Image (tube, rainbow, N blue to C red):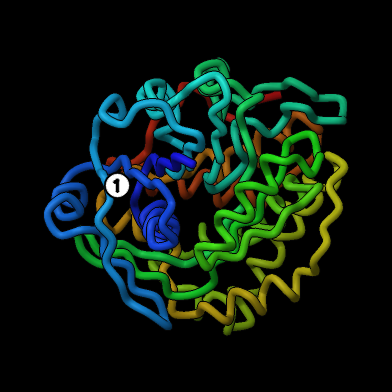
Amino acid sequence: MKFCVFGAGAIGGFVGGMVARSEADVSLVARGDHLSSIRKNGLRVITPDDEFTVSVPATDAPSDLGTQDVVFLAAKAHGLTAAAEALQPLLGPDTIVVSAQNGIPFWYFHAHSGNFDGHVLQTVDSGGKIAAAIGNQRVIGCVITSSNTVEEPGVVRNVGNRVFALGEPDGTLSDRVNEISMLLTKAGLEAPKTEDIRGDVWVKMWGNVSFSTMAVLTMSRLGPLVEGDDLQALGVKIMKEVQAVGEALGVTFRAKIADRLEGTRRVAGHKTSILQDLEAGRPMEVDAITGAVVEIGRLLKIETPMIDLVYALMRQRAREAGLYPEIGFDPLSYG
């Protein structure tokens, strides 16, 4: 199986390194100093239990790699419009695209059993360009619970968890989901198969919309946000609004808020990816994570005052830093 990671940063680099070590046919699409280091020294992966280096083909030109069986798409949500065009040389008639973004994914309403089947979220995929370029029929959803950082160019560190839940948008346990789950499991990752990948999306959104957002606004690691009563209470209010929106779409939350809080405490020293982006001067995933919930809330006529507030603050924080990718759509004015 030819397995290409498009966006081999913290998450993509970790996945690519682990799968490459299992002797799969892996290639990476990366850029900048990170790419240069991988080409020169290989990709070094550090985990709590192990440390290793793999030598894999790496490029910033997907046309160098040819058609793939699987593209693990780990580019940031705000970069997907450009990524969807750039990865075209990797796509053959049967190429699978594993979509592994934070936030509400561009394919969310594809094969959706509710009233909004086929609806396009403008905060995530303005004009439907991403779906048109990739093809929703290729997509397998992936919800990641794994804390990783690019420690230095060419070096990726995993600091906790390695769960990559996989599911078809239509809820079937397909052969291709089984195949990719087996590949990731062989590589030492946890790759549970689910018939409700959207449920996994919303459980992760609990933390993304609340504590990841609060981490940016306070410039804090996760610990202080869940260990003090005041900030934890604020986070729980946001989580309850997230849950109200998800449940209105028919989502069943298979975990409890208390469980999600406990999971966050276990990685108390971690900096969220969006805070890492702010500190590194990289564009921030404001809209796919927070703006999309605002948009869906408006679509469903559900009030989300706390989410509206943190979204407005996050958007301004990103703009002040010059890191907000303007999308030409304001979900606060929608509906």
Residue behind mark 1 = 282
Q: Is 316 placed above or below 255 here?
A: above
Quarter of the rendering containing residue 29: top left
Q: Relative to the observer, which residue lies in front, 311 or 159?
A: 159
Horizontal and vertical percent position of residue 215? 46, 65
**Image-based side of 270 in relation to 95, left or right:** left
Horizontal and vertical percent position of residue 309? 58, 49
**Image-based side of 145 in relation to 166, left or right:** left
Q: Secondary structure at mark 1?
A: loop
Quarter of the rendering containing residue 332: top right
Q: Name the quarter where the C terminus is drawn.
A: top right
Amino acid beneath label 1: Arg
* Identity of the residue drawn at 68% across and 34% down: 108
Horizontal and vertical percent position of residue 58? 25, 43
Horizontal and vertical percent position of residue 114? 87, 30
* Identity of the residue drawn at 28% across and 41% down: 322
| Residue 166 in view in this figure | yes
Q: Relative to the observer, which residue lies in front, 289 or 163?
A: 163
Quick one: label 1, few (<14), some, or many (20+) residues within 10 Å? some
| Residue 11 in view in this figure | no
**Image-based side of 207 in relation to 187, left or right:** right
